[in-house]
Image (cartoon, rainbow, N blue to C red):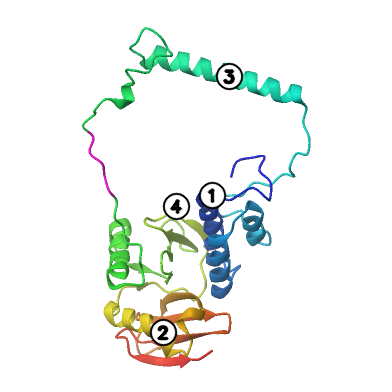
Amino acid sequence: MAPGQTPSTRAKDSDRTDTCQILDTALAEGQLSMSEHADRVKAATNAATLGELRALVADLQTANAPVQLPDLRSPRRSGTRAGWGIRIATAAVLVLAGVGVGWGLYGNTDSPLSFTADPGAKPDGVAPVVLTPPRQLHSLGGLSGLFEQMRTKFGDTAGYRMVVYPDYAVLDRPDPGDERRTLSYVYRGGWDDPSSGARGSDATVIDLAAFDVKAIVGVLRGAPESLNIKPGDVTSTYLNIDPARDPTTPGAPAISVNVSSDFGSGYIALNPDGSVKRINYP
């Protein structure tokens, strides 16, 4: 966000994305629970003003976040006509100076104000590159594609845990430079730069992709009905992949599908093959 903005300034998509990154870091650091994180991300996605976004992170420690939100200033209430006149005159001078410099560097006409031979309009032979990373992560192709993105980025699908939302995911992996630290990555069509946090004493590295993706996606799609939550009441749905605590299956992932609504939340605990371990109704 640019300096000088006020709480009532309308938010851009980039402002909402920055706020979500701060909330992702807070989740990884344990400042927010999963349900709090989901609620705040939803609010950030729907926020209309910068003041609404600032309120969502005001109580968080944000020093380790990959982005920072600047302080918002109170709106100016008055100004003189002379001050505005000076600003307009200065802006006009800067525009003309920029035109002259651009013409001097790139122009090929007899005047800097002649734009009939714009070098940017000439054919350059560069073909467009269309990026198609997986985005709908609660689908068979999306979840499988997410693990392919992991293999491409890291060379494997190992990690301490991963939380998969419909359109983004949060991944915790070991810090190769310090075994006492954890690196937390956020996937939104690509892997953001990680934030670092302390490694928990019970953190265990497992193969996060070692489960029947098709079976889990099927349970994921039917989770609201399985938990007796009306689809129209659902506020968030996410998939947790953690190390299993069952001593008879060391190294296996524990899967849970979590569904929240304004009337309660529930989850379905699953084995890697998609069979049910427990249904916790709202």
Question: In the rendered structure, does residue 108 fall within the stretch colored magenta?
Answer: no
Residue tagged 1? 12
Q: Answer few, some or many: residues within 10 Å of disc 4's Cα (few below 14, many 20 plus, some between 14 and 19).
A: few
Residue drawn at x 56%, y 69% as measured from the top left: 37
Mark 2 lies on residue = 223
Residue neighbourhood size for the residue with mark 1, other residues' Cα within 10 Å, grouped as few (<14), some (14–19), many (≥20): few
Q: Mark 3 against mark 1, which lies toward the viewer? A: 3
Please tell me whether residue 127 belongs to the stretch shown in magenta: yes
Q: Quadrant of residue 84?
A: top right
Q: How far apart are marks 3 and 1 (CA)?
A: 27 Å
Q: How crowded is mark 2: few (under 14 residues within 10 Å), some or many (20 or more)?
A: many
Secondary structure under badge 1?
Answer: loop
Of pointers 3 and 1, the one earlier in the residue sequence: 1
Q: Which of marks 2 and 1 is in front?
A: 1
**For the stretch drawn in magenta, what is the main secondary structure?**
loop
Mark 2 or mark 1: whose residue is earlier in sequence: 1
Q: Distance between the residues labelled 4 and 2?
A: 32 Å
Circles 4 and 2: CB distance less than 8 Å? no
- Residue 85's label in the rendered image is none
Q: Tell me which amino acid carries mark 4.
A: Asp
Residue underneath mark 4: 193
Bounds of the magenta segment: 126-130
Could you tell me which secondary element the residue under label 2 belongs to? helix
